[in-house]
Each structure stands twice: as structure tokens, then as C-alpha cells.
Image (spheres, helix red, strand yellow):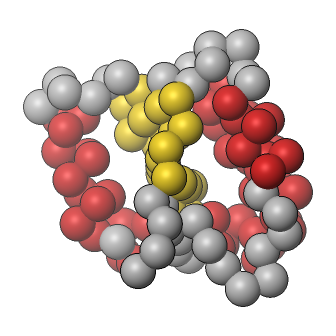
Amino acid sequence: MRLLVLYQARDAAQDHPGYYHGFERLVQEGVLRAHVAIAYYQIAQQRGWDGLWAEAAQAARAREADAIFLQWFHAKKMSDPTAGILRLKNLINRPTVAFMLGC
């Protein structure tokens, strides 16, 4: 499985080391074929929420992601994510999209 993770972070490895290094270890052990990290706060701050969705879709296409995990996907001032999520779900390879919400 090729996994794309949108981390609630500015730096995925530093802000969420357990998740980040855990997924990297699964790649090293051959359980995952790939782990691609996108720190969504960082991208949204630089390029806006539409820029985040564009980057996520491009990364998912380029790496043929089988699954996309949106970690703690909530933020103040976040625009409605529906169109961006549908954009990911409707990629040609139809990745599974999963969410972690709440505290």
C-alpha cells in the first residue's frame, strides 16, 4: 500500500513523530510500499486551502496513493473541505480516504 498522510502540522516528523516514524518504519519493514507526508498547516499557510488540495491531489497522483489519511482534520478558519476530499476520492486510482477527527 502507498499511503499519503495529511498531517495536522507544520513539520510532520517534528510535530507528530510517533505517527511519522511509525509509518516510516512500516515502509522499511515492507508493510507499506510508500509513506508520503504533507504537513497541511504549512501548505495552507503558504498557498491557502485550495493550494493544499492541489498539492495533495498532485502527490496522490504522482505516487499512485492507495490510501489517504487526514490526521485530525479540523482547524480554525479552514474552508469547507468537501470539494478537496471529493477531488482526492475521485482520482483515477480511487484511493481510500480515512479521517481522524476530534481530540
Q: Quadrant of the C terminus?
A: bottom left
Toward the top, the furthest residue is 92
Tell whether 60 sits left or right of 29.
Answer: right
Q: Residue at x 78, y 74 (%)?
A: 78
Tell whether 2 sits left or right of 70.
Answer: left
Toward the front, the furthest residue is 102
- Position above or below: 14 against 24: below
Q: Position of residue 59 (x, y in %)?
A: 64, 36
Q: Is residue 63 visible?
A: no
Question: Foreground: 73 or 7?
Answer: 73
Q: Residue at x 27, y 29 (%)?
A: 32
Q: Position of residue 72 (x, y in %)?
A: 49, 68
- Position above or below: 92 against 59: above
- Position above or below: 81 against 43: above
- Quarter of the figure with residue 35: top left
- Position above or below: 9 against 87: below
Toward the bottom, the furthest residue is 76
Question: Looking at the image, how many numbered discs can be counted on the residues?
Answer: 0
Q: Residue at x 70, y 35 (%)?
A: 88
Q: Residue at x 17, y 45 (%)?
A: 25
Tell whether 41 sits left or right of 7.
Answer: right
Q: Is residue 39 visible?
A: yes
Q: Position of residue 49 (x, y in %)?
A: 82, 64
Q: Quadrant of the N terminus?
A: top left
